[in-house]
Amino acid sequence: MAVNIVNVTSINGKTDAASIASNDSASFAVNTSATDVFKVNTILVSNQADSAGVGGDALVNVIFRDSSVDYNFINDIEVPMKSTLEVLGSSLYVNQNQSIAVQSDSSALNVLVSYESLT
């Protein structure tokens, strides 16, 4: 159930970071609370590869997870080696039993997700 954010009593900034292995994913802004809503503001993906071939340019998917259902909303965006890309165009809300996941075909990615917890 969505939380009414008109009467917010606190806003706490949060940042999660992770490294992602090849063909793996990491979850961010995992909301298990019935009283909080998360406002995701930024998703940065940094490709740490320094040579072409294995670990070169990376393809990244961003997934919105709602309970046990996954929705790809960013598909195969290319992150060139030795670069960082902001992959979220605007803020989104994450309610109870929802989360964001980032998946890659490269083993050289770091992901940073910045969001607010609204109570």
Image (tube, rainbow, N blue to C red):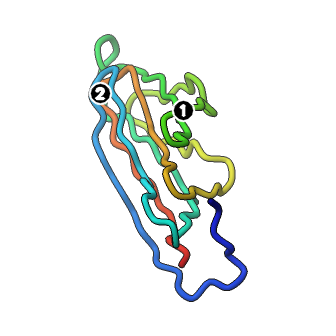
- How far separated are the C-alphas under marks 2 and 1? 35 Å
The x and y percentages for residue 21 are: 27, 28
- Which residue does the image show at 55% across and 22% down from the upper left? 76
- Which residue does the image show at 57% across and 27% down from the upper left? 77
- Which residue does the image show at 65% across and 57% down from the upper left? 91
Q: Residues within 10 Å of mark 1 (few under 14, many from 20)?
A: few
Please determine whether, in this image, residue 59 is positioned above or below residue 69: above
Residue occupying the far top of the picture: 53
The x and y percentages for residue 2 are: 65, 62
Front one among 83 and 96: 96
Please determine whether, in this image, residue 11 is positioned above or below residue 49: below
Label 1: state its secondary structure.
Answer: strand
Q: Earlier in the sequence, mark 2 or mark 1?
A: 2
Can you tell which quarter of the image residue 24 is in?
A: top left
Label 2: state its secondary structure.
Answer: loop
- Mark 1 lies on residue: 69
Q: Residues within 10 Å of mark 2 (few under 14, many from 20)?
A: some
- Which residue does the image show at 49% across and 51% down from the upper left? 97
Disc 2 versus disc 1: nearer the observer: 1
- Number of the label disc, if any, that sits on residue 105: none
Q: Is 97 left or right of 8, judged from the image as shown?
A: left
Residue occupying the far bottom of the picture: 9
Amino acid type, mark 1: Val
- Mark 2 lies on residue: 50
